[in-house]
Image: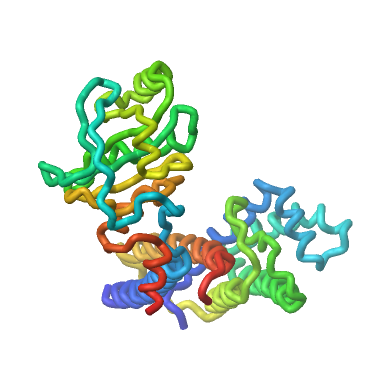
Amino acid sequence: MIDALLVSNVLLWLLVLGLALTVLALTRQIGLLHERISPVGALSPQSKVQVGDPAPELALFDLHDRPLQIGGASNDESRTLLFFLSPSCPVCETLLPTVQRVARTEVPRVRVILASDGAPEEHRVFIAKKRISHLPYILSAPLGMSYGVAKLPYAVLIDEDGIVAAQGLVNTREHLESLFEAQRHGVSSIQEYLEEKAK
Amino acid sequence: MIDPVIALTVRAALALLFAAAAWHKVSDRTRFAASLDAYALLPARLVSPSTWLLPALECSLAIGLLYAPTRAPTAIASMALLAIYAGAIAVNLARGRREIDCGCFASSARVPLSPWLIARNLVLIAAAALLLAPVRARALVWVDPFTVLAAVLVLWLLSASAQRLAQTGPGLQRLGGLR
């Protein structure tokens, strides 16, 4: 009996050694991944409003005739995510679930506002199809112009004091989430982040 | 002198390995033929028969390892086959042909050639060499079958992880970047 246990024990140690080596190799690969896949940031083109500037203040009505105040200090300590989209933009559609998740789960709270322009009928159909009637939806050309939105989908994160915290062209979930990362780290762009990291 | 449990574990694990290898080759013969062709070691007209011959050989090795009376000659034959495989990989590495599918694993896994594969074959040869040592006579108790079974299972999982690592490692290298 003692022989059997001895053999079993030695075998066990050898296998544990093999496992440990595998784990080591795995952690090395994960480390390499972290090193090689640099963080993805939203592309910030030259825009009218710079990060750190106060967001242009606008009082508007959304498609559901609810009054909305954009810009200025928030009275309930919530941030605002302005998501510029268009029903005819497929990338915007793929990002909608992420936008909805942000509205639901991001802490501290984020007030999500969808923004577009054009004929209301088309947008009403889009809202019904995508089941996003719970989110405010603004049709306003001046809103897009005041933020200098040239390409879609474009997102602007405004902090609780009404200051633009991050903004940019968002083509993927990572880009959208990077806006929140940017606010957390207090950097305005991916270039700035990489420069700081290199120091 | 090796313990019967060690001998049984090595036999079962090697048999499992050969059986799986044979299965992978037979289940996707076109890919295996392409892979053999890429090694550029066999004359073209031998490639097609080899896609049957090698799996058949591996299958008979698996059976021979499990059948007690034939295990010593089978162990030698296994070492020879593994050495041939290692040699084929070494020759192609020396030729600088790394980007060919090694054909060693399941068809879902395309593993490029690397020195690691030679190291793997050397370890397997060493394991087969263990079988040539005389087995110590001792009565098997209830815990022994459990040890063998668990060890074979863990070895199988470990080899699967090693295979994944061999697959993702070169993928990482290709990502480029700092190093």
Q: How many marks?
A: 0
Picture quadrant where residue B54 is located: bottom right
> Which residue is more in the foreground, A23 or B79?
A23
Question: Could you tell me which quadrant the N terminus of chain A lies in?
Answer: bottom left
Picture quadrant where residue A196 is located: bottom left
Q: Residue at x 29, y 73 (%)?
A: A5
Residue farthest toward the left in the current orientation of the protein:
A75
Q: Residue at x 24, y 21 (%)?
A: A65
Q: Residue at x 53, y 78 (%)?
A: B130
Coloring basis for residues: rainbow
Picture quadrant where residue A188 is located: bottom left
Residue farthest toward the bottom in the current orientation of the protein:
B1
Q: Is residue B42 left or right of residue B14?
A: right
In the image, residue A24 lies at what x, y percent? 39, 73
In the image, residue B39 lies at what x, y percent? 76, 65
Question: Could you tell me which quadrant the C terminus of chain A lies in?
Answer: bottom left
> Which residue is more in the foreground, A52 or B45?
A52
Q: Is residue B147 left or right of residue B135?
A: left
Q: Is residue B119 left or right of residue B93?
A: left
> Which residue is more in the foreground, A100 or A45?
A45
- Relative height, residue A37 to residue A54 (above, below): below
Q: Is residue B128 left or right of residue B84?
A: left
- Relative height, residue A157 to residue B165 (above, below): above
> Which residue is more in the foreground, A61 or A191?
A61
In the image, residue A94 lies at what x, y percent? 43, 36
User: Can see residue B82?
Assistant: yes
User: Can see residue B68?
Assistant: no
In the image, residue A48 lies at what x, y percent? 39, 49
- Relative height, residue A53 to residue A60 (above, below): below
Q: Residue at x 56, y 78 (%)?
A: B126
